[in-house]
Image (cartoon, grey):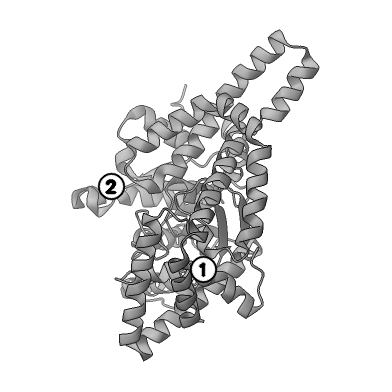
Amino acid sequence: MGERRKKRIYERNIYYTVLKYYVGFFYRLSYGKREYYGIEKLPSDGALIFASNHTNGLMDALAVLDLDNRPKVFVARSDIFKKPLLARLFFFLRIMPINRIRDGRNTLKYNDEIIKRSAEVLKNDVPFVILPEGTHRPMHSLLPLGKGIFRIALLANEEIAGEKPVYIVPMGLEYGSFFRYRSSLLLQIGDPINVTQYVASHPRAEEQPVIMNDLKEKLQKTMKELILYIPDDTHYDATWELCNMSCYRRITQLKLNYNCLRDRLTANKQTVRKILEKRESDPRESEKMLKEISLFANERIKRRISMASVANPRLGLFLFFRIFLLITLFPYFIACTALSAPTLFVSHLICLKTEDRAFHNSVRYVALLLLWTLSLLIIISVLFGFVKWKFALAAVIVFLPAPLFFYQYYKWFRITRSDIRWLLSKDLRKARERFVRWIL
């Protein structure tokens, strides 16, 4: 008998396929609102390399996975593959290791094999996903892109050798909050970069470094256009604060829809442009105003006032409606909290031990996926074992979203408390009006 062929990471696996749909379902429940744009731009005639910004831990990769029904192969930092059990798990999840400079320059030589395997994935019509910043950072900005994605694209182009074009597909992820569970997600796809076509226009081998730099600049420029890009300087926090507090007025000014995440992004990008223009035309006044906005933000945080309260144009109406919901649904909240307590407690405990807050939503998602599924199985077994099936079924349906309702109710409570504090902060409300008038 011949030696058994080693399974390839991109090959079909029925267990993975079933799990993917289940994982995707829970992922969608992690957001109160999601908007995806540009799916129609995805080429149907080539090998695709998805390139997204990296701001929110595991949730970024899952956003790309959830884009469509196609399986995808990912890369992750190599240090998490050191334990054999984890390495097998990541292989099942279609995640390959890649070494970074911070792992030691001597480890980079192992990337050549990974890049060859990546090209094999693309050759077999499976999209490849890489987050080219190399590390996550919860900011509305963009780190310099690494060269790995371009080496993979160029090698894949050589391996495929004219069978089909290779594309890099730029993507932009915008979160309503990097740290609040069940916030919002906006995913946008930019115009694909045809690597094959670009290489064909630069036929000389010595031009490869030029090609890589050109592709890098093109991808970085496109990714910046797909997100809210705020220059990472001393005025980053003040700029983001001003974007939030002026968003509704800007949307009204531009005649856009406040309920549309893409329109909110458009409004905030306009505000960033206005701030940069003012910094250029009147640096002294701009410096003064941005410093005042930073002080405003610090005082707002000190008083525990949410930016949602500051940005809300119809505070009174929403406040009374939320108070009504909090009172009416309180008994259901208590029941949901009791049933989902193990899931919530473990999630909270892990978050307390996880210093990097950008991973907290990933922790909450995984806890919900695993622990709430287990809890539901136990609850269903107990109910159907001791209660008539009609009542058992009704109870399961009613309490199925228990942990999700906990997060939603807590959000209502947190914002209601913040709204009251904001209404009592006359000095901050007066300052906000001055800042908004300045930037409009």
Q: Give how far across and how far down residue 322 sits, in percent.
A: 64, 49
Residue 208 lies left or right of residue 261; in this view the side is: left
Q: Residue furthest top?
A: 386
Q: Which residue is mark 1?
A: 226
Q: Residue at x 39, y 38 (%)?
A: 351
Residue 60 lies left or right of residue 399; in this view the side is: left
Does residue 185 appear anywhere in the picture?
Answer: yes
Q: Residue at x 65, y 14 (%)?
A: 381
Of the two numbered discs 1 and 2 on the same chain, state the one appearing first in sequence: 2
Q: Which residue is mark 2?
A: 110
Q: Residue at x 63, y 38 (%)?
A: 21
Q: Give how far across and how far down residue 3 sits, in percent.
A: 43, 26
User: Identity of the amino acid at label 1?
Assistant: Leu
| Image disc number at residue 11 | none
Q: Residues within 10 Å of mark 2 (few under 14, many from 20)?
A: few
* Element type at mark 2: helix
User: Identity of the amino acid at label 2?
Assistant: Tyr
Q: Please tell me in which quadrant of the rendered image residue 384 appears.
A: top right
Q: Residue furthest bottom?
A: 281
The answer to which of 365 and 239 lies nearer the viewer is: 239
The answer to which of 379 and 65 lies nearer the viewer is: 379
Q: Give how far across and how far down residue 168 sits, in percent.
A: 49, 63
Residue 43 lies left or right of residue 395; in this view the side is: left
Residue 67 position (above or below residue 168): above
Residue 229 position (above or below residue 386): below
